[in-house]
Image: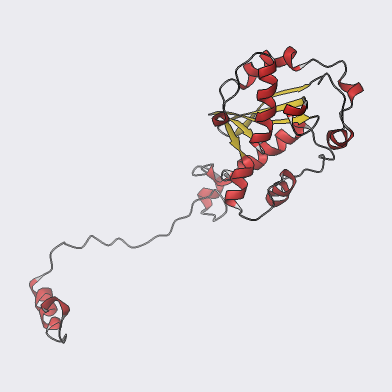
């Protein structure tokens, strides 16, 4: 199963008021394991960079001035994501921006059904607990020390690890060690097998003997007011 973990950085919160995407980062998963394939691009928003947004991601108007526009990269982006589920932290936000950019480029919108919202998954699994990316990294022991500012590719890489944990975690014990040294020694460590020698006992015949039936009947006579005779 192919999935794409995706994150964007923007100039603000609302594409309807003129905010634009300035960075897209994607990490490809196959059966929930990163393949090493990524998609990462800075985008010229063709507008100024508000101070509040710059303080979040550190991408200045001057830095983005020579970068491609969304229209320039839209075909490459759509080829990369294709029809794979998009794993996004707060999917409504990123999907709103992506679809605004796609519409402006004359492309069809991405259906919300294509997105997987990790915020919703986290809130379902841990009701009342913080569900930010930093909080989930802390919960699962994922090192996010490099995350001094938001960055689309780094955040996608961290989210890929968080998503794996949200969906059941790393299955370290799945590797079968039946032919390994630990299994041969009967070790009880992770991934090993152990056995206990027990004497053979043949299966009991299904029907009771005449003596057993007589003993059972005698036992029943000692029960006062049995419910099966009411």
Colour convention: secondary structure
Asked if residue 170 shows in the view, the reply is no
Question: Could you tell me how many numbered marks the image carries?
Answer: 0
Q: From the image, which quarter does the C terminus lie in?
A: bottom left
Q: Nearer the viewer, residue 179 or 206?
A: 206
Q: Work out which residue is located at the far front of the displayed protein and give it.
A: 17
Asked if residue 188 shows in the view, the reply is yes
Rendering coords of residue 14 (x, y %) = 74, 31
Kindly identify the residue that appears in the image at 23 percent across and 60 percent down. 203
Kindly identify the residue that appears in the image at 72 percent across and 43 percent down. 133
Q: Nearer the viewer, residue 50 or 66?
A: 50
Q: Is residue 105 above or below residue 52?
A: above
Picture quarter containing residue 216? bottom left
Q: Is residue 69 above or below residue 144?
A: above
Rendering coords of residue 21 (x, y %) = 76, 25
Rendering coords of residue 74 (x, y %) = 69, 15
Q: Work out which residue is located at the far right of the displayed protein and give it.
A: 62
Picture quarter containing residue 107? top right
Q: Nearer the viewer, residue 127 or 160?
A: 127
Rendering coords of residue 227 (x, y %) = 16, 78
Q: Nearer the viewer, residue 205 or 44?
A: 44
Picture quarter containing residue 31? top right
Position of 17 with respect to 126 (left or right) is: right
Kindly identify the residue that appears in the image at 64 percent across and 35 percent down. 91
Q: Is residue 58 above or below residue 167?
A: above
């Amino acid at each position: 199963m192919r999935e794409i973990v995706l994150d964007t950085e923007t100039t603000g919160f609302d594409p309807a008021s003129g905010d634009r995407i300035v960075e897209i980062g994607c990490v490809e998963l196959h059966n929930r394991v990163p393949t090493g394939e990524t998609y990462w691009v800075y985008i010229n928003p063709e507008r100024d960079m508000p101070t509040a947004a710059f303080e979040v991601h550190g991408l200045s108007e001057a830095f983005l001035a020579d970068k491609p526009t969304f229209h320039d990269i839209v075909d490459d982006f759509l080829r990369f994501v294709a029809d794979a589920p998009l794993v996004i932290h707060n999917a409504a936000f990123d999907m709103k921006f992506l679809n605004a950019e796609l519409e402006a480029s004359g492309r069809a919108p991405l259906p919300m059904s294509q997105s997987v919202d990790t915020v919703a998954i986290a809130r379902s699994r841990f009701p009342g607990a913080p569900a930010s990316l930093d909080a989930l990294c802390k919960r699962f022991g994922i090192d996010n020390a490099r995350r001094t500012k938001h960055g689309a590719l780094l955040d996608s890489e961290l989210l890929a690890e968080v998503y794996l944990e949200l969906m059941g975690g790393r299955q370290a014990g799945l590797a079968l060690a039946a032919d390994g040294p630990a299994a041969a020694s009967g070790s009880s460590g992770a991934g090993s097998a152990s056995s206990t020698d027990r004497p053979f006992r043949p299966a009991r015949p299904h029907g009771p003997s005449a003596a057993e039936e007589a003993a059972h009947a005698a036992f029943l006579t000692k029960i006062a007011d049995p419910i099966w005779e009411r």
